[in-house]
Image (tube, rainbow, N blue to C red):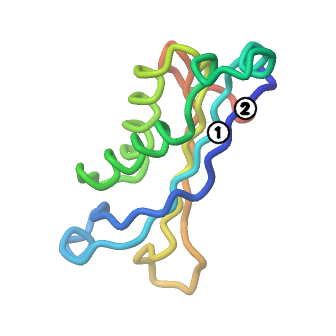
Amino acid sequence: MSDRILVQRIAVFAHHGLLPEEARLGQRFYISLDCGLDLAEAGRSDDVARTVSYADLTEIVVEIATQRRFALIEALAEAIAGACLDRFALLRTITVRVDKPSAPVPALIDGVSIAITRGRDGQPLQAGL
């Protein structure tokens, strides 16, 4: 699948992490989506019903990231991927990237990130769409 919808760096303030301070204080996270689907019909028809709304994708991300708490950003990504695949039948694959710029590690880093790719059967896929 070569057609994609990209939603990049949705900023949320949330309370994910293993440490008690992360649960109490919270921090900023950036979440990006790379959705694989066939956009040909949407392009030909100019009809939003033939695609997946990036506003709806963003709403799911913000809702899950701010209303639930996860110890691992891997679990956050998994929940987002599952919710998007469940809600939008047009999606064939989705890659969810979670950036944690203020990760509490004993070094000077710009941040940490994870990325997962899931398809219709829920199994991990090879990187890239």
Q: Are marks 2 and 1 in contact (CB under 8 Å)?
A: yes
Residue underneath mark 2: 4
Q: How many marks?
A: 2
Vertical order, 126 against 97 (above or below)? above
Looking at the rendered structure, the secondary structure element under dot 1 is: strand
Quadrant location of residue 45? top right
- Pointer 2 local density, CA inside 10 Å: few below 14, some 14–19, many at least 20: some
How far across and down, in percent of the image, does residue 8 sit? 62, 53
Looking at the rendered structure, the secondary structure element under dot 2 is: strand
Quadrant location of residue 95? top right
Q: Residue at x 67, y 26 (%)?
A: 36
How far across and down, in percent of the image, does residue 102 sit? 45, 76
Q: CA distance from mark 2 to mark 1?
A: 6 Å
Q: Quadrant of the N terminus?
A: top right
Could you tell whether 69 is left or right of 122 in the image?
left
Vertical order, 113 against 118 (above or below)? below
Looking at the picture, which amino acid does disc 2 mark? Arg
Q: Which mark is residue 96?
A: none
Vertical order, 128 against 13 (above or below)? above
Q: Which mark is residue 34?
A: 1
Q: Residue at x 55, y 27 (%)?
A: 118
Looking at the picture, which amino acid does disc 1 mark? Asp
How far across and down, in percent of the image, does residue 98 sit? 51, 54
- Pointer 1 local density, CA inside 10 Å: few below 14, some 14–19, many at least 20: some
How far across and down, in percent of the image, does residue 125 sit? 63, 25
Q: Residue at x 29, y 72 (%)?
A: 26
**Mark 2 / mark 1, whichever is N-terminal:** 2
Could you tell whether 28 is left or right of 23 in the image?
right
**Residue at the extreme front:** 46
Could you tell whether 29 is left or right of 46 in the image?
left
Q: Quadrant of the C terminus?
A: top right
Q: Residue at x 52, y 57 (%)?
A: 10
